[in-house]
Every structure is written in C-alpha cells, then in structure tokens.
Amino acid sequence: MGRAIEERDPLDARQILYTLLMLIPVGRVTTYASLARAIGTSPRAVGRLLAMNDNPVIIPCHRVVKSDGSLGGYTPGGPMIKRRILELEGVRFRGGKVDPECIIDIASVLGVSGKRSK
DNA sequence: CAGATAGGAATGA
DNA sequence: TCATTCCTATCTG
C-alpha cells in the first residue's frame, strides 16, 4: 500500500486526521488520544488541527471526545448539542459522559499497537 | 522565537 | 477521587 503512517510526512497529519474521522462508524466515537496515536502526534495537536482547519462538513468533531469520555472543549452551539448529536448517532451516555463501550480506539483499529518507539 | 491551545498522563494530597 | 503540574505537537503573532 502506499505510504505507511510510519513513513508519512508530519505535515500530512491533518489530512490523516480527516480520513480517520470519516472512518469512524456511526454510533461510535473516538478520542483525541487515539487519533493522536494513530496519526503519530499528540492530542493537543489533534485539537489544534481540528480547531483551525475547519472543514466542518467532512469533519464530525462531535465524534471526537476526551479519553475519559467527556465531550471535551469545543461544541458548536453548546455542550448539549454535542451530546445530543452523539445520542442521535446511537451513542449511549452514562452520567455526563460517553459510554466507554461506544468509544473505539481508531489506532487499535488501524493496527497501531501501543505507542511509537521513542 | 514566544505565547496560546478543542488533551493526556503523572504526581501529590 | 480530586487538584495540581508537566508534557507534546501545531497555530498565530
């Protein structure tokens, strides 16, 4: 296959990010940590790329939550909206957080085991 | 180069 | 368990 994630240029992080988001099945969410792990960057960078990039049409930001199940920071319209969208997608909520069973580690799906060697 | 940020992990109490 | 602190990667000035 083309370029392995281990060989990609760091500047493509954002492109990979969009692709991963589109790969997330409906009714499931992923975390910044998983995305960061899959891309090979830090969760901070993931949020930064999503924040500024803004291709809101192809970027379901609402499917990205924090590692502990919290919705995270930015919510278009308000915190309730993000939760509501996820519920409509089929994600269950427990307390004020996403059900851990509805969270998928995109990195694990890609086959990225553990962290990168550093 | 310095500062700020849509998080994560570790440490201390 | 909660609060505090440090870290990493990308963006803007």
Image: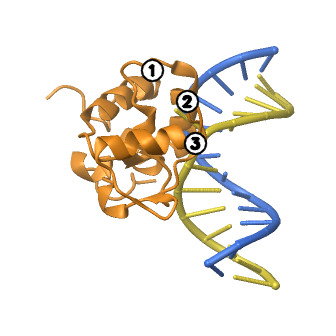
Chain colours: A orange, B yellow, C blue
Amino acid on which the number 3 mark rests in the picture: Pro
Asked if badges 1 and 3 are on one and the same chain, I answer: yes
- Which numbered disc flags the more N-terminal residue, 1 or 3? 1
Front-most of residues A87 and A102: A87
**Which chain is disc 1 placed on?**
A
Distance, label 2 to label 3, CA atoms, is 8 Å
The structure residue drawn at horizontal position 57% and vertical position 27%, both measured from the top left corner, is A51
**To which residue does mark 3 refer?**
A79
Amino acid on which the number 1 mark rests in the picture: Pro
Distance, label 2 to label 1, CA atoms, is 10 Å
Mark 3: few/some/many CA within 10 Å (<14, 14-19, 20+): few
The structure residue drawn at horizontal position 44% and vertical position 42%, both measured from the top left corner, is A84
Answer with the quarter of the image where residue A38 lies: top left
Amino acid on which the number 2 mark rests in the picture: Pro
Would residue A88 be found to the left or right of residue A62 on screen?
A: left
- Identify the element where label 2 is drawn: loop
**Which chain is disc 2 placed on?**
A
**To which residue does mark 1 refer?**
A56
Residue A73 is situated, as x and y percent measured from the top left of the image, at: 61, 42
**To which residue does mark 2 refer?**
A76
Mark 2: few/some/many CA within 10 Å (<14, 14-19, 20+): few
